[in-house]
Amino acid sequence: MNVLRDASAKRDRLGRGRSWRTRLGATASIAILFSGLLTPGTAHAGDIVPCPANITEWKFIGINRSGFIWEGYRFTTLSVTPQFLIGDGRVLDNNTDLPVNYTISSSVSQTYTVSASTGVTANVGSYLTHSVNSSIVMSRTTAIGVTLATTVPAHTRLIAEYGVEGYDVSYAIEAWRVKRRNNVPPTTGDQCEEWGWYPQRTIAPTHLEGWRLRTA
């Protein structure tokens, strides 16, 4: 009987040990899970460095226990390709042996707008006009009723296109953050945290609008 009781007690102790180790393992797993969830992403865990001199814009974005939070933006141009943004067009055929006169008029209106989905509120328009071309506008709608008189030579197909000059622009916005004790914009040399890198691409229209002629 004593042998049976000793064996039963040993099993109870082993069972309690396994139960304790199981609970400890589950607790450790939960701790690891939450540790992974709370780890900041790369955009929120940048190095702390002196603020660059070529930050073009600072914005006050909030306040917390650490102080006043400012966010600054720096633009980097990746590529710029000129484009003619076509809003309307005509094909003018002359299959005769003599020149033919045509008069055409734009009848379709098209709107082109600079787009930017950055996660930040940087002044993209200012960057585009200062760094790409001063004729860029944030939005342009082509006009209706603009006429063109032209002569198509014999046995020629002429393509007339109405639109605006523009640019296909690829760029990046780099964001930096600074915590200050007073609500004053940061200056070069303050301690900045690298906050994010936002690649962008947009079609940027200009105010230059009209007909363009080319042969097929």
Image: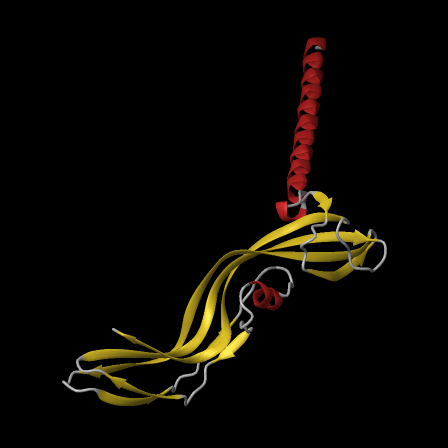
Name the quadrant containing residue 146.
bottom left
Placement of 177 over or under 37, stated as above or below: below
Image coordinates of residue 191 in percent, x first then y, are 76, 47
Q: Residue at x 70, y 24 (%)?
A: 16
Q: Residue at x 69, y 42 (%)?
A: 47
Image coordinates of residue 157 in percent, x first then y, are 23, 78
Placement of 136 over or under 18, stated as above or below: below
Image coordinates of residue 133 in percent, x first then y, are 53, 67
Q: Residue at x 69, y 50 (%)?
A: 52
Judge by depth and name the residue closer to the eye, 150 or 13. 150
Judge by depth and name the residue closer to the eye, 45 or 26. 45
In which quadrant is the C terminus drawn? bottom left
Left/right placement of residue 92 relative to residue 164 reads left
Name the quadrant containing residue 212.
bottom left
Left/right placement of residue 154 relative to residue 82 reads left
Name the quadrant containing residue 60.
bottom right
Left/right placement of residue 85 relative to residue 90 reads right
Image coordinates of residue 211 in percent, x first then y, are 38, 81
